[in-house]
Amino acid sequence: MKRKRISTALAQGKREDGRGLMDFRKIVIKKGILEKAEGSAEVWLGDTRVIAGVKVGVGEPYQDTPNQAVLTVNAEFTPIASPTFEPGPPDETSIELARVVDRGIRSSEAIDFEKYCIIPGKAVYVIFIDICILNYAGNLIDASALAALAALQSTKVPKYVAEGGEVKPLDASEPLELRDLPIAVTVGKIDGSLIVDPTADEEDVMGTRFTVTVNQEGNICALQKSGPEGLTLEEIRKAINIALEKAPEIRKLLMES
Amino acid sequence: MSKKKLIVKGVRLDGRKWNELRPIKIEGGVLPNADGSAYLEQGRNRIIVGVFGPRELHPKHLAKPHKAVLRCRYHMAPFSVDPRRSPAPSRRDTELSMVIRNALEPALFLERYPRASIDVFVEILQADGSTRCASITAASVALVDAGIPMRDLVAACSAGKIDSEVVLDLNDIEDKEGEADLPVAYMPKLGKVTLLQMDGMLSPEEFDKALNLALEGCNKIYELQREALKSRYVKQGEGRSAE
């Protein structure tokens, strides 16, 4: 029923909430909303509401990257966000979401991991981005990627110094240096139609979701196709072009917020 | 990112050209207890896949009244990589299990088996890069071996960018040290891409080139899958007539 209604409307270029196929809902970005996190942001995408918090600490580097900071992205689908979300360990959807957000930030090399090394092989900055879904109304990936980036923009990194092989905190901090602003644009396919920024109802009937993350130079820095249907080459090309066109618009909003 | 040369005078570290696949061996029907199975070698990748079903789904509340549930588990043996990894599923394993399921599902007629499950278990015995693609290639053969009807075989192959060049079928070091990795799964007869991921950095032009290269790789692997399946049945047929 729902599928037929949404699909028929889409074939005529219409969506249930009155948007065009290529329109995002209203995007609101608020940075630095929390005091105890080193960085934070809240993003609304229509009724979808997401908070990202950044905590920065000091820890050991990974063995294979002894002079690089550690980045960890985690997502929690809190039970308040939807009657269908249940408390418990992260399921595959939340793991995928966190990994897609992580991939965009990592691949774009937005953070200079080598800059945030304190003592090679021993102590590096550890940056945690935790994404907390407060209300689910579709398109969590784009909202979360945006919230993560906005939170990083507001992040103040506490300063440490290396003294005789020990790490000592200084009573000072400086803004996190971001070298890029990777924007995720998710394109949904419902029957023959491609749309951006799907609602929860649209996601219910969507056959495929395809997320394209675009960096400042207009290069592609992450892709993720998900869902039980395939994509034709033509659909892939269209989706990439949609993302290349939409990403700068969203980046502009982010920079103005 | 450390800068180690991955291409020297047009030749990759393992001796391949930019558009060359690693040696591939596919064998169907290798596990007596599974309904279908396949073993695959691609370079130093060693992967074994077992398929069970369609069979009754447990626990029952997960069953769907109008179609079968496809379940996939991608699992790496602790000794498959260096250093040893924990046998417990990682976040990466959870994501890969999901994308492999999504890559195979478009090929299956799940609506024919209400309330049932089809289970695909992938065991990585040795990992050497592009294991998600190799898993999909092997799983397709195992599904056919299980006698499960399919719309098409799903063939998978990666492309990527190393030393600023677009190349086919990344091995482990090329994946780790390279600039981009683009795993693709494809149903050649239907012209549908069923897995598409990327990490790293590609310009839109490089992406087009890499995607086309990966699809060429898929087409070659598709032929190898068909040969593996044919030779198995030819051999079986010969065996029977000799009795």
Image (cartoon, coloured by chain):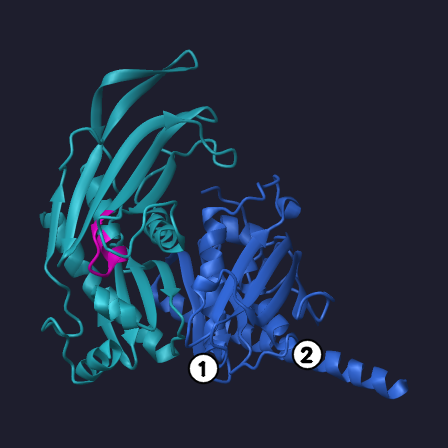
Q: In the drawing, what numbered circle is on residue B191?
A: 1
- Which residues fall within the magenta stretch? A133-143
**Residue sitting at the far top:** A164
Q: Secondary structure at mark 1?
A: loop
If you read the primary sequence from the N terminus, does the residue marked by circle 2 or circle 1 appear first?
1
The residue at the point 29 percent across, 73 percent down is A205
Tell which of B128 and A120 is nearer to you.
B128
The residue at the point 26 percent across, 78 percent down is A3
Provide the chain ID for the residue under circle 1: B
**Residue A145 at x, y percent in the picture:** 26, 51
Colour representing chain B: blue
The residue at the point 42 percent across, 74 percent down is B65
Provide the chain ID for the residue under circle 2: B
Question: Circle 2 sits on which residue?
Answer: B229
Judge from the rendering whether residue A197 lies leftward or rightward of residue A167; answer left or right: left
Neighbours of disc 1 within 10 Å: few (<14), some (14-19), many (20+): some
Q: Secondary structure at mark 2?
A: helix
The answer to whether one can see residue B21 in this image is no
Colour representing chain A: cyan
**Residue sitting at the far right:** B243
